[in-house]
Image (spheres, rainbow, N blue to C red):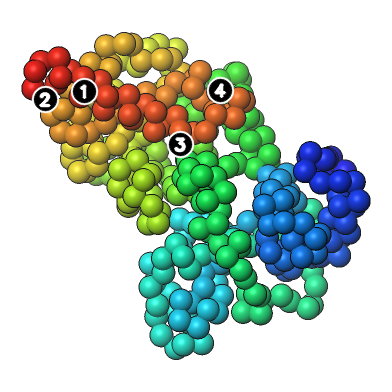
Amino acid sequence: MCSFQLSSLDDILAQDKIQQVERILASHTTNTILTVSKLSEQLSVDDEVSDKVLEILYNNDVLNKYYAVQCPECELLIQDFKALVDIPEEIYCYNCDETISLSRDNIYVVYRISDSFSGGQFNDEVMTLSKLTVRQTDSFVYKLAQCNYNFNKLLYSPTQKQFKELEDLYNLAFNSKHANTKSKGDAFEDLCRMLFNCCNCFKAANLKTRTNQVDCYVRSYFRFSKDLIDAENYSIYVECKNENKTPGVGYFNKLHSILVTSSARQGIIMSRKKASKNYLLDAQTFYLSSKIIIINIDKDDIYDIIFHRKNFLEVIDVKFSEIQALAANSLKNLGLV
């Protein structure tokens, strides 16, 4: 047991409880399932404390987090998923022998010991989902309540391991020598894609079309809240510019053209240098004419996200809202609203 992985529990648990957590983890293997309610009973603590303990262990790569879906008819836990974005609209319940529709009320959060922490130990006594009893405090809805229904906080919460990978990619993109421009650009694209893929609502990848290559195409399939930006199943087109010059208006016009052609509404220029203030005027024009929002996230923003732990989704939301507010103010000043 690595003591530093449990040291973060000092603020919420007495030493005897921490030792008890250590014993619980030592007796578990990768196929053992933990939940808030189960740990509460084992530690004799309330559910809020148990939830914090599990999240700390998850953030320190002791546990992996999964989202288990429950049949709304027979209440059987059917299957778990690594990310919320992977949960389908419908799933087959083998107990009811029918396909059932899912809502966020049917999702429960479960944890398993990570392979790296357990050393790959496996137990023949498998704790299957179907044998697991869950309570309301194990639910996704409970998680929402715990973070005051802040979807950004819930959907973007990288582990320490992920943050270390982001730090390495940042240094590779910005602080390393590259053999050529392509190598430099590829390193930045890898960083940008990982930032989006650390969000539990996104899947990001390079996209080639017949007429264009999009550095980073981001798709959201998160169906359980319409509060996330402005729509479900939306796309974000991202251009990555790791150049030692301010991204010019040509980049924004090109991205706007791609968005219009693809009927998308959100675009991001991610760049080493900050865009000029004039870009805000163009961004307002884009929004007023076609409801398309294009924002700029630069190296300093990315540094704050990775090293100062700013919430990436919050940064996106604030910048999107800024464009909308500036556009609304322009209309007001012209007496059009």
Residue at the spot of label 4: 303
Q: Specify whether 334 is left or right of 92.
A: left
Q: Residue at x 38, y 44 (%)?
A: 228
Q: Where residue 86 sits: x, y (%)?
A: 47, 60
Foreground pick, 260 / 92: 92
Q: CA distance from mark 2 to mark 3?
A: 30 Å
User: Residue 214's image quarter?
Assistant: top left
Which amino acid does the dot numbered 4 rest on?
Tyr
Q: Which residue does the numbered mark 2 point to in the structure image?
A: 337
Task: Tell me which residue sits at (41%, 32%) in the image.
Answer: 316
Q: Is residue 162 visible?
A: yes
Judged left or right of residue 9, residue 261 is left
Q: Earlier in the sequence, mark 4 or mark 2?
A: 4
Q: Are marks 1 and 4 in contact (CB under 8 Å)?
A: no
Q: Mark 3 or mark 4: name the one nearer the start of the chain.
A: 4
Amino acid carrying mark 2 in the image: Val
Residue at 86% across, 46% down: 14
**Residue 167, percent from left and from top:** 63, 29
Give the distance between the C-alpha atoms of the residues marked 1 and 2, in whole angstroms. 11 Å
Q: Which residue is mark 1?
A: 327
Q: Quadrant of the C terminus?
A: top left
Label 3 sits on residue: 313
Q: Is residue 9 toward the left or the right of residue 263 in the image?
A: right
Dot in front, 2 or 3: 2
* Disc 3, SS: helix
Sequence-first tag of 2 and 3: 3
Residue 290: x and y in percent read: 15, 33
